[in-house]
Amino acid sequence: MLKKLLPIIILLFFSTSCGFEAKYKGFEGVDFVLKLQNSKGDRELNNAIKSQLSRYDKDKDDYNLIKLDLDSKFEKISISKNSKGEITKYNLKAEVNFRISLDEKTREIFFIEEFKIDKISDTVQEKNYIQIIKKDFAQSIVQNLIIDIRKNK
């Protein structure tokens, strides 16, 4: 019985996959270099964006040099209160404006990311959670920026 099932199990194991796909598979063949010139706004969000952009800051002479200016704004807005008047929910909102300069052309791109969270009673945990969300915002914004640059280059 086991001898009959073993080949089937092995066949199923090798023929199916877990669905793994490389995270940056869609970013293969990037032929440009991103240089962040100036940044202003929310320091934590800007640092997370700079970290994400560092992957595209290479010293390649044959690549197009794209200069970026970054202006960000992060808000933590209360959206819900309980009967005692205590805040129970927040809306976290990141607004990021990029000024993109390639050769002599300049254009601007604006991204908005929002996320709703429940208030966490421990302020340290809440602050750490917000930092994680800012990093996620930065990752999403940079991915959308790369996609936009590749489409409109």
Image (cartoon, rainbow, N blue to C red):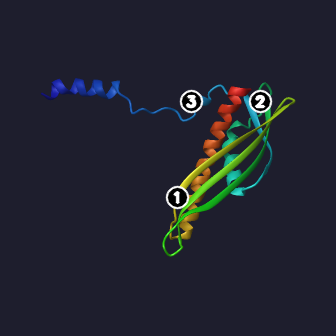
Of the pair 47 and 42, the residue shown nearer to us:
42
Q: Which mark is residue 71?
A: none
Q: Earlier in the sequence, mark 2 or mark 3?
A: 3
Q: Residues within 10 Å of mark 2 (few under 14, many from 20)?
A: few
The residue at 61%/44% (across/down) is 139
Q: Quadrant of residue 132?
A: bottom right
The residues bearing labels 2 and 1 have C-alpha atoms spaced at a distance of 42 Å
Q: Earlier in the sequence, mark 2 or mark 1?
A: 2
Residue denoted by label 2: 60
Q: Which mark is residue 117?
A: 1
State the residue lying farthest toward the right.
104
Label 2 element class: loop
Percent of width and height locating residue 31: 71, 26
Residue denoted by label 3: 25
Q: Residues within 10 Å of mark 3 (few under 14, many from 20)?
A: few
- Kind of residue at badge 1: Ile
- Kind of residue at badge 3: Lys
The total of numbered circles placed on residues is 3
